[in-house]
Amino acid sequence: MKKTLSLSALSLALIGLSGAAQAEMDAPGIYVGAGYGQYSIQFEDRENDIDFDDDSAVLKGYVGAQFNAYLSLELAYQNFDEANDIDNYAEIDGLSLAAIVSLPISENFSLFAKGGWFEWKADVSTTIPAIGNITSSQEGGDIFYGAGLQYAFTKNIRARIEYERFELEDDIDPDLDVASVSIQYMF
């Protein structure tokens, strides 16, 4: 009987400790992160007979507040490297504010979806035969969305893989599809 009681007590203690570790992972906190990825930009300007499609790199840094295991708020800066083809050039950067809804699937893994607002600025240049080089700076604000998978190495160090879609409402309606990997630190 004493042996059964001791095993039961030990089992309950281990369950309590694993629950405490999980509670620490889900505790509210502030985090910072940095990421690298690739993006694809596509747009079509029928008025000037321009069709643009290119891939390039993106760097991002972000800071966020995790309220619980399911909800976070995140502010990010994205710097989309220069994309160009023979006649066209585009460089975009901006700030985003997103709500993130997470679904923990184990102690270390969680799926998430995000959506929010992206304030952007773009420098665009194109060469049109018989007219020459046209350069402009444009800016705007639009919604964006994404989804991903996050893995917690420790209670402080996490990594995530994500996809984001930015549909910029401009005269040429450029679309940006981003796939990135990030590392973040929880305070």
Image (cartoon, rainbow, N blue to C red):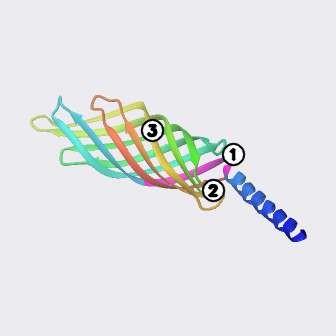
Q: Residue at x 78, y 57 (%)?
A: 16
According to the image, label 1 marks what residue? 28
Look at the image and give the residue range highlighted in magenta: 26-36
Calculate the distance from the C-alpha at mark 2 to the C-alpha at mark 3. 25 Å
According to the image, label 3 marks what residue? 145
Q: Amino acid at mark 3?
A: Tyr
Left or right position of 154 against 162: right
Depth check, mark 1 against mark 2: the one in front is 2
Calculate the distance from the C-alpha at mark 3 to the C-alpha at mark 1. 23 Å
Q: Residues within 10 Å of mark 1 (few under 14, many from 20)?
A: some
Residue 138 location (% of width, % of height): 34, 33
Outermost residue, right side: 2
Camera-nearest residue between 1 and 171: 1
Q: Residue at x 73, y 55 (%)?
A: 19
Camera-nearest residue between 13 and 45: 13
Q: Residues within 10 Å of mark 3 (few under 14, many from 20)?
A: some
Left or right position of 140 against 26: left
Mark before the other along the chain sequence, 2 or 3: 2
Depth check, mark 2 against mark 3: the one in front is 2
Q: Amino acid at mark 1?
A: Pro
Q: Secondary structure at mark 2?
A: loop
Left or right position of 2 against 95: right
Mark before the other along the chain sequence, 1 or 2: 1
Figure disc tally: 3
Q: What predominant SS class does the magenta segment belong to? A: strand
According to the image, label 2 marks what residue? 107
Answer whether labels 2 and 3 touch (C-beta < 8 Å): no
Outermost residue, front side: 1
Q: Residue at x 21, y 48 (%)?
A: 85
Q: Amino acid at mark 2?
A: Glu
Q: Secondary structure at mark 1?
A: loop
